[in-house]
Structures are given as structure tokens and as C-alpha cells.
Amino acid sequence: MAKSTANHKKRRASPSVESEVCIYCAVAFIGDKNEPRWVACDNCDAWYHVKCTDLSPSLSREEVETLQWFCRNCISLE
């Protein structure tokens, strides 16, 4: 679930450490600048490939950085 908001803080578009793993596909972040974009859940801070989520793959890096997004696990807890 995504929601764009001007009050939402800007964040990184990819993990900053190589130990992060996409929760959905279990592929690790390798730090390659050609690697697919990532997004973090705004509730649990887990990282996901944009392509593994319900987000549009056409979103720009800037749009992903300013987007408010919640993973399936956090949405199901509501």
C-alpha cells in the first residue's frame, strides 16, 4: 500500500548496508548501482525490491524516496 505525502521524510532509495535482504524474494542487496530500486516499509523498516511489491516499476527514484509505503506484513497487522 502506497501513499504519497509531502510531510513524509525523504529516505534512501536503497539499503545502506550489504546485509539487507529483500523479504519477498530473499535476494541480498549487493551495493551495485545498477541494482533494482528498493523501498523500505514505513512501519517495520524492512527493505524490498520495488519490483517485488505492489508499486509501479515506472516510479522514479525520487518518487520512491518520498513515498509512504507499508509492506503486506504490516498491513495485515492493522
Image (cartoon, rainbow, N blue to C red):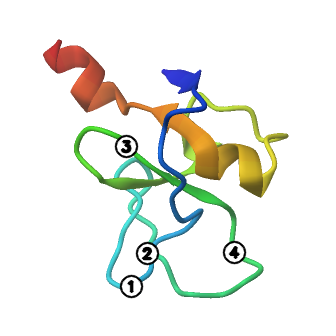
Residue 6, placed above or below residue 47:
above
Q: Nearer the viewer, mark 4 or mark 1?
A: 1
Label whose residue precedes the other's in the sequence (4 or 1):
1
- Where residue 33 sits, quadrant-wise, is bottom right
**Mark 1, other Cα within 10 Å: few <14 / some 14–19 / many ≥20:** few
Q: Is residue 29 left or right of residue 59?
A: left
Quadrant of the frame with the C terminus? top left
- List the residue tagged with mark 2: 28
- List the residue tagged with mark 1: 17
| Residue positioned 65% across, 47% down in the render | 64
- List the residue tagged with mark 4: 35
Q: Amino acid at mark 4?
A: Glu
Label number found at residue 8: none
Q: Which residue sits furthest top?
A: 78
Q: Nearer the viewer, mark 1 or mark 2?
A: 1
Q: Is residue 75 left or right of residue 7?
A: left
- Where residue 34 sits, quadrant-wise, is bottom right
| Residue positioned 48% across, 48% down in the render | 9
Residue 67 picture location, percent across and down: 58, 37
Label whose residue precedes the other's in the sequence (1 or 2):
1
Residue 16 picture location, percent across and down: 44, 80
- Where residue 58 sits, quadrant-wise, is top right
- List the residue tagged with mark 3: 41
Cα separation between marks 1 and 3: 16 Å
Residue 18, placed above or below residue 48:
below
